[in-house]
Image (spheres, helix red, strand yellow):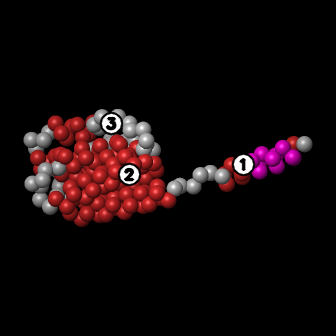
C-alpha cells in the first residue's frame, strides 16, 4: 500500500511540474529587449564614465519592486544628471528610453496600477545636493550603472505588477 501511495505522489509531482504555465511570448520579448537595452547602457557607462579618484560611491540601496519602482528610480537618477555634464546627452537619452519602454509595457500589461513608489534614500540624498552639479551627476551615473547591474540579475522583477 505504501508503495502505491509513493507512486501516486511521484506522478502528481511530475504532473504538476509539467503543467506549469510557460512564460508568454510577450514577456520573453520584453525581458529580452530590456536586457539588451540595459547591457548597452552599462557598456556605454563603463566606456564613457569612470569614477574619478577620490570620489567614493556608497553602495546602492535601491530596490527592484516591479516596473513602477524601476521606472521611478531610472527617471529620478536621470533628473539629477546635469545636461551640461560632458558627454552625458546620449546616456540620458538611453536611460529615458529604457524607462519609457518599461513604463509603456507596465501600462499595457498591469491592470492594477500601484501608487507611485516613494523616492529611495540615495536618490533623495542626491537631489538635496544639487548645488554640486558635477559631483552629483557623476555619482548618479555610477548609481545608475549599479542599479542596471541589479536589474540585469533580477529581470524577473519586471513581471511583478
Q: Which residues are magenta?
A: 3-13
- At x 43% / y 48%, what residue is drawn? 109
Binning the other alpha carbons within 10 Å of mark 2 as few (below 14), some (14 to 19) or many (20 upward) gives: some
Q: Earlier in the sequence, mark 2 or mark 3?
A: 2
Q: Secondary structure at mark 1?
A: helix
- From what the image shows, is residue 47 above or below residue 108? below
Whether residues under marks 2 and 1 lie with C-beta atoms below 8 angstroms apart, the answer is: no
Task: Report which residue position mark 3 lands on.
Answer: 117
Task: Report which residue position mark 2 lands on.
Answer: 105
Point out residue 44 in the picture as x, y percentages from the top left corner. Answer: 25, 63
Q: Secondary structure at mark 2?
A: helix
Whether residues under marks 1 and 3 lie with C-beta atoms below 8 angstroms apart, the answer is: no
Point out residue 151 in the picture as x, y percentages from the top left corner. Answer: 38, 51
Q: Which mark is residue 13?
A: 1
- Which image quadrant: the C terminus? top left
Point out residue 101 in the picture as x, y percentages from the top left corner. Answer: 33, 54
Query: Which residue occupies the foreground of this view, 110 or 92?
Result: 110
Amino acid at each position: 500500500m505504501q508503495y502505491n501511495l509513493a507512486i501516486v505522489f511521484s506522478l502528481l509531482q511530475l504532473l504538476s511540474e509539467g503543467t506549469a504555465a510557460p512564460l508568454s511570448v510577450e514577456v520573453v520579448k520584453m525581458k529580452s529587449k530590456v536586457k539588451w537595452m540595459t547591457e548597452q547602457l552599462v557598456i556605454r557607462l563603463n566606456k564613457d564614465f569612470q569614477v574619478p579618484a577620490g570620489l567614493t560611491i556608497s553602495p546602492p540601496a535601491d530596490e527592484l519592486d516591479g516596473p513602477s519602482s524601476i521606472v521611478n528610480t531610472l527617471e529620478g537618477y536621470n533628473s539629477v544628471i546635469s545636461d551640461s555634464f560632458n558627454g552625458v546627452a546620449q546616456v540620458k537619452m538611453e536611460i529615458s528610453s529604457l524607462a519609457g519602454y518599461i513604463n509603456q509595457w507596465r501600462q499595457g500589461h498591469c491592470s492594477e496600477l500601484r501608487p507611485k513608489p516613494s523616492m529611495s534614500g540615495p536618490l533623495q540624498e542626491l537631489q538635496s545636493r544639487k548645488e554640486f552639479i558635477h559631483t552629483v551627476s557623476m555619482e548618479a551615473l555610477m548609481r545608475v550603472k549599479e542599479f542596471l547591474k541589479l536589474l540585469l540579475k533580477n529581470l524577473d522583477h519586471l513581471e511583478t505588477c
